[in-house]
Image (cartoon, rainbow, N blue to C red):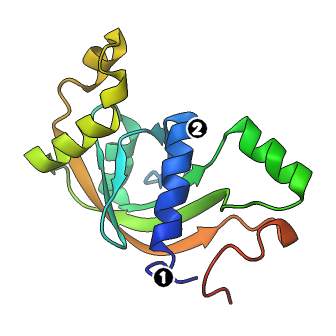
Amino acid sequence: MHLHENWSAIKSVFCDAFRSSFHYAIATVNADGEPHITPIGSMILGKPGHGLYFEEFTRTMPINMRANKKICVLAVNSSRWYWIRSLVKGRFATAPAVRLYGTVGEARLATDDEIGRWRQRVSHLRLTKGHKLLWANMKFVRDIEFTRMEPMLIGSMTSELWKGRA
């Protein structure tokens, strides 16, 4: 699959996934080869093949990344009505899920622009107690360079959704 050619569709899946579940699943591997999955809601995709996430609440991921900086991110549109509608119609109108594979950089201070983008994303929750408790002091990010994508293919229900299929 062509990562850059499908970037718009990938971003759309990520948007739908965040809207339906507020997170993505990021898989890392520890030094012994044991997998670990962490829900991350603060990932932001940028130009094709690039993204970042705020590293504020993760504990195991940074330890795993000392040994292996490769990750896999899974984004799934978890909307119940999306799935029911798709099952009734016998096809998905939009891609239901995608995996992105890549490598993370070192933790660094977020730029004002990155913090602004994150605040904009969660601005509709700004009047909640949790908003202030969770997101008032987001400071550190890790850049991600994605090298490939793997769409979730569900037979004929998704056969026409991705460009450049092998």
* Quadrant housing the N terminus: bottom right
Q: Nearer the viewer, residue 5 or 100?
A: 5
Name the N-terminal-most of marks 1 and 2: 1
Question: Crowdedness of circle 2 by 10 Å Cα count: few (<14), some, many (20+)?
Answer: some
Determine the CA span between mark 1 and mark 2: 25 Å
* Quadrant housing the C terminus: bottom right
- Using residue 74 as the reference point, say whether residue 166 is left or right of it: right
Q: Which of 150 and 108 is in front in this view?
A: 150
Name the residue tied to disc 2: 20
x and y, in percent, of residue 84 in the image: 83, 43
Question: Crowdedness of circle 1 by 10 Å Cα count: few (<14), some, many (20+)?
Answer: few
User: Which residue does the image show at 46% across and 69% down from the upper left?
Assistant: 8
Q: Nearer the viewer, residue 30 or 57?
A: 57
Within the image, what quadrant is residue 156 found in?
Answer: bottom right
User: Which residue does the image show at 27% across and 33% down from the upper left?
Assistant: 56
x and y, in percent, of residue 29 in the image: 48, 54
Name the residue tied to disc 1: 5
108 relative to 8, above or below = above
Q: What residue type is labelled 1?
A: Glu
Q: Is mark 1 on a helix, strand or loop?
A: loop
Q: What residue type is labelled 2?
A: Ser
Question: Which residue is outermost to the top?
Answer: 129
- Using residue 107 as the reference point, say whether residue 88 is left or right of it: right
x and y, in percent, of residue 101 in the image: 48, 67
User: Which residue does the image show at 64% across and 68% down from the upper left?
Assistant: 151
120 relative to 134, above or below = below
- Using residue 87 as the reference point, say whether residue 98 is left or right of it: left
Image label count:
2
The numbered dot on residue 107 is: none
Q: Is mark 2 on a helix, strand or loop?
A: helix
Within the image, what quadrant is residue 124 found in?
Answer: top left
Within the image, what quadrant is residue 164 found in?
Answer: bottom right
